[in-house]
Structures are given as C-alpha cells and as structure tokens.
Image (tube, rainbow, N blue to C red):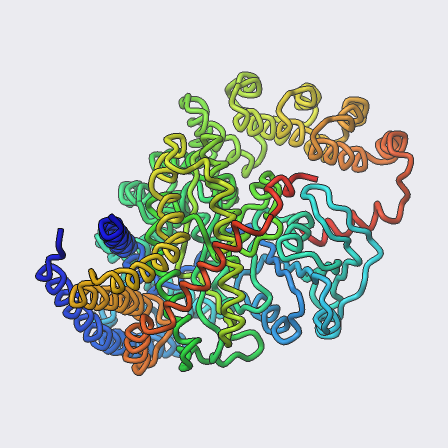
Amino acid sequence: MLMNAVIYINWFILCYFVLLAAGYIFLLINSLKDVFMRYMEIKVDNTTSMTKVLKIPAVTVMMAAFNEEDNIIEAVESVLNSDYTNTHLLIVNDGSTDNTLELLINKYKLYKTSSSFVAKRVKIQSEVKGVYLSHSYSNITVIDKTHYDKSDSLNVALDACRTPLFVTVDADSIIEPETISEMVLYLLTQPHIVAVGGSVYILNDCKVKDGKIIKASMPYSYLLGMQACEYLRSFIFARSGWNSLGGALSFSGTMTLLETEEIVELGGFDLHNDAYDFEIVTRLHARKIECEVPYQIGYTSAASAWTDVPATFKTYWNQRVNWQVGTMRSLLLHKKMLFNPKYGLTGFFTYPFFLFGDALAPVVEFVAYLMLIISWSLGILDGYGALLLFVTCLGFITLLTMANFLISLVSYNKYQRIRDIPWVFCLSVIELFGFHQYNVICRVVGTIRYFFVKRPSLSSVGSA
Amino acid sequence: MELNYNIIEFAITVEVIIIVLIIISSYVLTAIIYVREQANKKAQKDIKTYLRKQVLANQSFSVERFPRKWKKMHLLFPVIEELNKFYSNDSSWEPIAKGLMTTVMLPLARKYAHSRIWIYRFYACKTFESVAEKKDADAIFRLTNDSVPLVYIHSIKAAIQCCSEKAVKNIISRMAETSWITQSVCSEFFKNAPTEVQNMIENVLLTSKEEGMREVAYDLMRQFHPKDLKLDVTEDVNSDNIELRIAALKYITHVNKDKALPFLIKALEDKWWKLKVVALHRLSLMDASGAIKAIAACLDDPGWAVRNSAAEALKALGPEGEKELRARAIELDDMPFKAKDRLSKMLW
C-alpha cells in the first residue's frame, strides 16, 4: 500500500510539473506580441515625441530609505536625470541609523520646514520628525520619520502625495532616463490602465556614474549570474505574458506606476509585508472586479530599473525567505478569489497559477525530492526514467532562460556583449545543480515560517 | 502505468534543437541589428549634411534633386526633428523644412497611411499633424481607429489640423472609453484649435445621446472660448451619470459664472461627494460670497475630501470666508495653516 501511495504521488508530481511547463510555454507565446511591438517601438523615440506634444500629468517618485547611505545619492540622481519633466521626488527616511539623511541634506541643500505633518488620508504607524525642502531643487521633499517598515514609509509618502500618479522606486535602484516616460505613455495609451509595471535588471557589476548606467553588464559571478537569469525569466515573459489576460498579480516594488487616488481608496500598502508590491496589485485586482469597473493592469518592458541584489548566500537566504512569507500572505489574504466565478479569468486562471504554480511550486518540488529518496529506498525508483526527467527539466529551464535572453537581446538591448550569450547558456545549465535546490529550500522555509509566525490581519491597513 | 521513454527522449531532442537554434539566432540577429543600425546612421548623417549645405547656401528645396534612396520616412523624420531643434531660430531652414514635408513626406504619408507596419502609420500621422490637407480627411479618419495607441494619439492632432468632422467625432467616441488622465491629456490638443472644431464638438452635444461622448464633449468645449450652447444643459446637470453631471457643471461655470451659481449651490446638497468637491472647487474660483453659508455647511460633511474642499473654498473667498472657517475651527492659528498651504502648493 505504501508503494502504491508513493507511485500515485510521483505521478501527481509529474502531472503537476507538466501542467506548469505548459503554463509557462503559454505565457511565453502570449508575450511574443508585446515583444514584437517593442521591437518595432525601439526604432522610434516615442517618449520624446510624447513629452513634446502632450501636457503630461505630474508624477511623484516615492522612495523609502532605511540605511541606504551607499546608494541613495545615485538613486536620487537617476530620478533627477529622468527625461520626464513633471516629476516630484518624495524621499522618506525610515529612521536610518547611518548617514542617509545627512548625505541628502548636504548634497541637495535641504532645510527643515516648520510645518507639521498630520496624516489625513492613509493610516500611518510611525511619527514624522520633520519635513525637508531643498534650496536648489524645488521638486525634492524629504520626510524624516521614526523607523517602522518600508510599507509604512510608502504610506507616509502616499499621504503626502499630491499628484495624480506616483512611482515607487527602491532607494538602492537606478532608473533609466526614459523609464517614467515609458510608463506614463503606456498608461495614457491603453484603456482603463490603473497600474503599470516595468522590467528590473541586476545593477551589481554595472558601471554607474551620477545616477546613469555607463556600462550595463551581465554579472560574471555565480550567485549574481544566477539571479540575473531569474530576473530575465521573471520580468520578460512572465509579466508581459499576462497583459492580455488582465495583468499579473505582482509587479516589482523596485518600480511600479500607480494612480494615487486608487491606492488611497484601498487604504495604502500592507504593513509587515516584504511583498507589499504583490499584495497591493492583488488587492487592486480584487477591488476593481468587485466594483465591476473595467480595468487593466499592464506591464511594459520598455521601462527599466536596475537594482542591487544580494551578493552573499546569507543575504540571499534572508531575502527569499521574507519574499516567500510576503507572497504567501499576499495571496492568502485574498483567497476569496480562488476559483470564484465572480472574479472571472483572474479567479479561475491568474490567481490559481500564482498560488499553485508560483508560491507552492517549491513545496511540491521539495516533496518531489523527498519522494525520490523514498522511491530509491523502496527499490521502485526507475533510474533511467528519473535521469531522463531530470534532463528534460534541465533542458526546459535552459530553453526558457535562453528564449528570454534572446527576447532581451532583440528587443531591449540591455546586455550587448557577444560573450554574454554563452555565459547565460552555462548559467542556465548549471542552475539545476545546486542553486535551484537552494532556492527551493529558502522558499519552503519561508512557507513554513508563514504558517507558524502570527502576522497582523489586513485590517491594520485603512484610511486615516 | 509506466513512463514512455520515447516521448521523454523526443522532448529532450526538441529542447536541444530549440536551444541550439536560439543560440544561433542570437548571434545572427545581433549581427543583423548592428549592420542595419550602422547603415541607417550613415544614411541619416548624409541627409543631415545635404540639408545643412542647403541651409548655408540659402537654397530652396527641390524634390527633383533630392536622392530617391533617402525618400524613406524612418530615415527622414528623425533628421527633420533634429534639424527643427537645431535651426529653431534660423529662418532659412523653414522653407526647406516646409518643402521637404509637403513634397516628400506628405506623398509618403499618403502612401503609407494604410501600411501594415505601424511605424509607417505613426510617421504618416506625424506628417499629417503638420501639413494635412482636406483630401487627407479619410486617411486621418482611418488612423483615428488605429489599434496602436501612439498612432491614435498623434491622429488627434492630425484630425484637428485637417478639421475633419468625422475624425473629430470618432476621437470623442474613443476618448470616452479611456481613463480620466488620458482624457485630460488628449483634451489639451484641442487648445488653440480653430473655431470650426468647436462647432464640430457642439454638434456632438446636439446629436449624440451617448453619455460618455457627451461628457468628453463638454470637457473639450472648455478648451475653447466660452460659448453659450444651443442646447439646454440642465438635463445633463441632473443626469444619473455622475461624470456627465460633473462635466456639465464645469461647462456651465466656464460659460457664465453668475448663471452657474444656483447649480453649484444645489450641487452642495448632492449625495455624491465628487460632485460636491467639484462644486466647492468652482465656487472657490469665483465671487461666491452669497454661497458662504452653504459652503460652511459642508465642513460637517462625513467625507474628508468634501470637508477639505470646503475649507479651501472658504479660505479662497477672502476675509468673510476665513471668518466663517475660524468660527468653526477656533484652534487654528496662522503658522501651520500657511505652512501646510505652502507645502501643498510645492508638492503639486
């Protein structure tokens, strides 16, 4: 009986991964139209033509900074270098214990205003210590507050935001000059868009000066290279593939454009959640469907940001465990959407895919490894079959990574060196020999931590 | 059940073939893109040199002498835009640019207005924006139905340039389906449009029953000089559609502030908070001393936005309004009130 159970579980796992692979191939094919459009678009300097002829809406760039003295100036400079002329930069210093605030004060000639900040529209948990304006830059505002968490900092910025649109940008990231223009152009030119996401690339090993990427380069170390492949897969086809299906459930908090009033009405960002970006987009989906309002959540790969990723295995572990906890929280807070006909395609396809195909996939994979050991110990392991399946998985991951790299090369031209092609190929081949398994363990630990550590409910978010 | 090795081996073979094809394609496409980019750059450099020589020699543009190999929209347009910027203060460039646009670009635009390649349709739109004629009305109308958003946005300008009623009506119909941000951005195109276009928009209000289109039409009418409409706006001000009500209310205020006052005061008692906020904002922009009591009553509204707008309106109405405000909020003192006001203005 045990043997039969093991065999059935093995078949279930096989079917699960075949379905998952089919889903990814579907997304890849679905993304090709957007890729082709982008390939044509890069021939035209459309952002300049847009900003010349249109009266462009004001955009606030929100940055939450906690102990970012190494990166904050470059991040701010990248925003100031933007070709979008109607931006306001709102930086929230989240009680940094290093010189983040002092660096900003010295660099941008900030002075403390006498005004007091009282949150009116969104509930905040921390106390605002001061508001700083700049003598040299009329569009920079810095809000200094006591430390809480990143979501709370963004909520402070949200309450202070007076423009119809805002973009969240991480304080350790660089955006490209045309990023904001591309996102706004996408919002203006697609019907009913309420949120726009962009692509994220790895900043480590790139040459940066005064907030500009001088030389973009595929990282040549093992851990960074693996993460670069992960990001290529996540942001190229896995986001644009959802465009025609109503939009993905998650975008990167590194850079997302949102409508201010929409997020204020939702009550702001979820606290104690490292995947706050995931949660807010999912909540937006749910709210729009419940209100029966036509909407679209879009992704444009033309808008790019470059972010620092963990360079050591320990920091990678912490990041991925926290992300997994946040992902589980973000999805399970909205579990009412699962297979609920009221939520249409999002309820029947998008949400289940993210829950079972993304969040719980590491758990299934971990069980698969356990079943491998159990099958071997029971003497029912088909060695040749297992090897064939492993090679198939290896080939599939390599195929996906190379396909995304080709898409990136043709359409977005971020990595331009010829030697990047064989390097990405090598990385995608060796990924399944250790790194991928490490990633699975991180995420399984994160899933376990979610179920055993008590977290506040969504009611901690709300209007002021 | 047993695994079928043949299927798995076949899958592996297919994967390997695809991966090899992808690697080869990556190298080949990189090379093709590089070669094409270099060829385009060279051609554009030659065109720039040719046109600059003409400007320096103060020659007029001659289509017969212009090399045929350069008559391509994707080569010419970026060069024209660059030289427009470069020679913005030079009057000798203007006749050459006009000649180039009317004798080379306009025929190309007419030829490629229905092209399957959207970039050519985009350049066609941009050409029509500057030099469209009446006979281009049909082509422009088709472009206003374009599925590519960038083409559609530029077709708006082209339609206004050409004064095509059919195209303008189509634009209004499409704008009705977009978000309020897109509508407000696109409506800017209609600023400084000829009076003929204003009459076309008014016709939409007279003939169309569709609420979305009427709402957009009211908003577009506000881009023009105030004009009393032939129709009775009262019906739209009392419509069930909140967006239409707001648009009609804004238009009445734009045309005649005194006539609008009773409508605005009535709107302050409405159940929709958005309507109240709009009415309060409009009242803050005019001499509404007769409405101070009605505005002050909004300070007790359950909605924060309404209360805030009421406070802003009272403040804007001068000493009488401020007196009413302080009577309700006696803990207010000047410094934080003024500082918050200054900060709010800066953040906008």
Left or right of B134 in this view: A228: right
Left or right of A151 in this view: B125: left
Q: Nearer the viewer, residue A138 or B4?
A: B4
Residue at the extreme left:
B6
Q: Which of A356 and A103 is in front in this view?
A: A356
Quadrant for residue B314, please give it: top right
Q: Nearer the viewer, residue B66 or A285?
A: A285
Question: Residue B258: percent from the left, percent from the top?
Answer: 70, 24
- Asked whether residue A33 appears in the rendered view, the answer is no
Question: Residue A397: percent from the left, percent from the top?
Answer: 28, 65
Question: Residue B182: percent from the left, percent from the top?
Answer: 48, 44
Q: Is residue A83 above or below residue B127?
A: below
Residue drawn at x 58%, y 77% as measured from the top left: A210
- Asked whether residue A11 appears in the rendered view, the answer is yes
Left or right of A150 in this view: A333: left
Residue drawn at x 24%, y 56% as measured from the top left: B117
Question: Residue A450: percent from the left, percent from the top?
Answer: 52, 52
